[in-house]
Amino acid sequence: MNPCRGYGWLGGLLVATALAAAATAADYSSTLKAGKAEIKSAGALAFGPEGILFVGDSMGASIFALDTQDRKPGKAGAFEVQGVNQKIAALLGTAADQVMIQDLAVNPVSKRVYLSVARGRGPEAVPVILRTDASGALEEFSLQNVKFSRVDLPNAPSPDAKDRRGQTTRLEAITDLAFVDGRVVIAGLSNEEFASNLRAIPFPFQQADRGSSIEIFHGAHGRFETNAPVRTFVPFEIKAESHILAAYTCTPLVKFPVSSLKPGTKVVGTTIAELGNRNRPLDMIVYKKGGGSFILMSNSSRGVMKMATDKIDTFGGITEQTDVRGLPYETIASLKGVEQLDRYDEANAVILARTEGGSLDLKTVPLP
């Protein structure tokens, strides 16, 4: 859901070094071509090098790489945009209840905050990309004449496919994404028998493979599962090996070595925590503070969880029914109603938080 989530743990802590290395290795923006980006739905966001914004388009079953041309270093500063959903509605000429903010991502260079927005409800909603900065001024990022590239997912769920609640599963073709070690890692559902899917697509894009079918043991449910989608994830390094830490509904936290994500394989993740039933993880980031590293995860009903990662390699292998267990967490009581978050700088995060009155505020907060 960049020193931030889009770059992930591996590149996010060393932005300047990563960007210098990327510039030496490849001129990514030169691989993009100008035109109209025909995005059908704007969902998960993540930044890569050179101000390139990756956008997950579930309805189009595609990943877009957009050149924001937003490469001028910006100065971080505390800010707050109260009622940002109402301001977006006014900008787009609609009502606040017809605006859905799907994700946010911070450009680690410029410090601008990008928002993926649906104007309207359901599969027919119009996708919009907006951005703002410490001034609080909102502007639309035009998709009409932009340098971009696109890769299509070959095995996304059919637009007509439904889950047991009658909801279209196509909307979960892409649930989260991140740029990791020159590849875009994508979580979501496929049309395979084992539908839960992780794939790592090299960038610049050529074509997407079928990805890996992933299986986890869900301790709260007491069974192995292959059809539950990853809701949110972060890249993380464990013992010098790149991993994906993925969170699922009700709420297992699972690790996958990135090296295991090979086309056409079935990968079994290691469940390192069960964080509570009747809960949906919404977004997560990784950060450093006071010599330690931490995960911060927002949830639908269990608030914002903070987890220390210094002993993360000692937890895992949950294979029996259980309640809360594994990697311990604390709840950050001061952070309420958080629906989206991303790292802003070394000391702060940007959060999208719903107030008691129902409006959404976009603001910076100190990392706990």
Image (cartoon, rainbow, N blue to C red):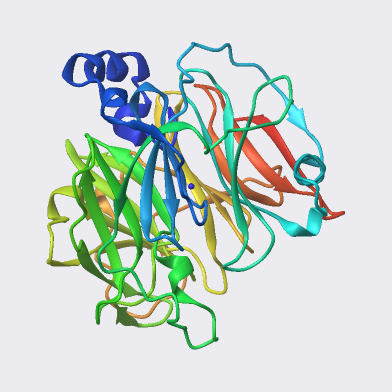
Q: Residue at x 52, y 56 (%)?
A: 41
Q: Which x, y percent locates residue 84? A: 76, 40
| 341 left or right, relative to 218 | right
Is residue 192 depicted above or below 231 in this figure?
Answer: below
Q: Residue at x 53, y 37 (%)?
A: 144
Name the residue: 43% across, 27% down: 3
Q: Quadrant of the C terminus?
A: top right
- Return the x and y of residue 188 as percentages of the image width and height: 37, 63
Counting the numbered discs, the total is: 0
Q: Is residue 367 visible?
A: no
Residue 256, located in which quarter of the rendered image? bottom left
- In the image, residue 125 lies at what x, y percent? 62, 61
Residue 292 position in % (x across, y down) = 40, 30
- Tell me, yes or no, if residue 16 can be seen here: yes
Q: Is residue 80 above or below residue 327?
A: above
Which is nearer the eye, 341 or 83?
Answer: 83
| Residue at image point 38% right, 76% down | 158
Query: Left or right of 177: which side holds 299?
Result: right
